[in-house]
Image: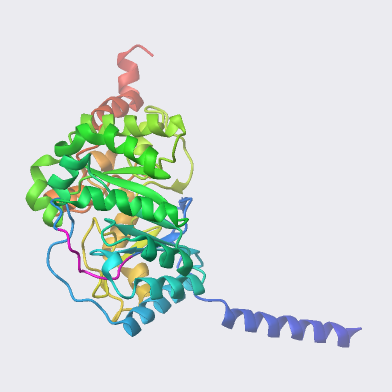
Amino acid sequence: MYAVAVVVVAVVVVVAAVVAVAVPVVVAVVVDNRRPHYNEPFFLQWHITDKCPLNCKHCYRDLEKNDLDFETLLSVLDKFAEFLKKIRKKGRIQFAGGEPLVSPYLIPLIKESVKRGFPVRILSSGVTLTEEKARKIYEAGCSLIQISLEGGCDKNDEIRGTGNFDMAINAMKAAKANGIEVTVSMTVSKSNLNNIDEVYEIAKENADRFVAARLIPVGRGGEELGDQLLSKGEVKSVLKKLKKYREAGVIDVPMRDPLWGAMNLNEFFPPKCNIVTGCSVGYNGITIESNGEIMPCRRLPIVLGNILENDLVEVWKNSKVLNDVRDRDNLKGECGSCRIKWFCGGCRGIPYGLEGDYLGEDSQCFRMHLNEKITAFFKPESKKNKGE
């Protein structure tokens, strides 16, 4: 009996040793016992090319960058796969650019990504998407494409270039005809604020979902449309429209802006629980540029390293920028004092683009005027003054 016990213990020890070797290093991201709560897989926004035939006024790109060859791109893909194993997360890849459709490596990379188990999607302007190319993309394993549109024909082409509207509509039709779901994406500024309903109607007719994002003042967008940023009230009106579209249920309207939290949480009594949600920077996504540069988010263009030279796990774990942003007690101004900062976090690209400070307040947040009232409400002396 003792001999059997010794054997069992020995087997347990051996198995434990094997597991210890086999299980990858876990890089947990936990701040003050708050657990990240994001409903989507960890995403890689992968800019596989810097090339683009368009010259959109609101583009967040600026300086031209080199593209990598196919073998190097494959090594990036393998490094991302290994990174996900080590942080024990499921992943998704979003192919972006430039314009990813002009890259000769798009379809081979889709195939290689799917082979490794990643769901994929394409972020595009729709240029060069023919029915034949759409069929090849679908057969490679991609069933979702996001196509940008900024208004009706005149307004869209004013922002994105002459002839782009027709190309975008044709691209949507080509994608749908070949089994690919379409998301219409709109970047909203003062210049096209009044075109949201028009784009939504186009999306209802030609797409499966509609998203609208705020203009972020970085890259060309900061130079050409920096004076077109939405006011707090305009941001709130946009989110109210999106909420109305979402509730209509005709097509899907994802809630992607961190300020959705400010729309949907009770103003004076936000829920108390140890989770982090809202802005995904530092928690649920990373960007890799066409030359291998690693960034927190393409709308927060701070270079953290280069995946060709730096270990992605080490960057993820030790980057000062990522660790600063993860701890939302580091946020400044109204964001720092906000009671729902762990549910929102604001967009870090706004203060960075405006002031060069990624920890500053999101000055487009319409909740700001409430913070002083909320703080006063919870102060004991304010209750005494009311005779309570």
Q: Is residue 296 above or below residue 354?
A: below
Residue located 40% across and 44% down the image: 209
Residues 120 and 27: in front is 120
Q: Is residue 80 above or below residue 95?
A: below
Residue 264: image location, x then y, percent: 40, 32
Q: Is residue 269 left or right of residue 370?
A: right
Residues 380 and 77: in front is 77
Residue 331: image location, x then y, percent: 26, 48
Q: Main secondary structure of the magenta part?
A: loop
Does any portion of residue 165 appear in the rendered image?
A: yes
Residue located 30% across and 65% down the image: 101
Total marks shown come to 0
52 in the magenta segment: yes
Q: Is residue 19 above or below residue 295?
A: below
Residues 237 and 203: in front is 203
Q: Is residue 139 left or right of residue 368?
A: right
Q: Quadrant of residue 60?
A: bottom left
Q: Is residue 297 above or below residue 271?
A: below
Q: Is residue 111 left or right of residue 99?
A: right
Q: Quadrant of residue 106?
A: bottom left
225 in the magenta segment: no
Residue 117: image location, x then y, percent: 52, 70
Residue 246: image location, x then y, percent: 42, 34
Q: Is residue 54 left or right of residue 307?
A: left
Looking at this rendering, what residue extends furthest in the right direction?
Answer: 1
The N terminus lies in quadrant = bottom right
The C terminus lies in quadrant = top left
Does any portion of residue 294 appear in the rendered image?
A: no
- Indicate how the structure is coloured in the image: rainbow
Residue located 34% across and 43% down the image: 211
Q: Which residues are magenta?
A: 46-54
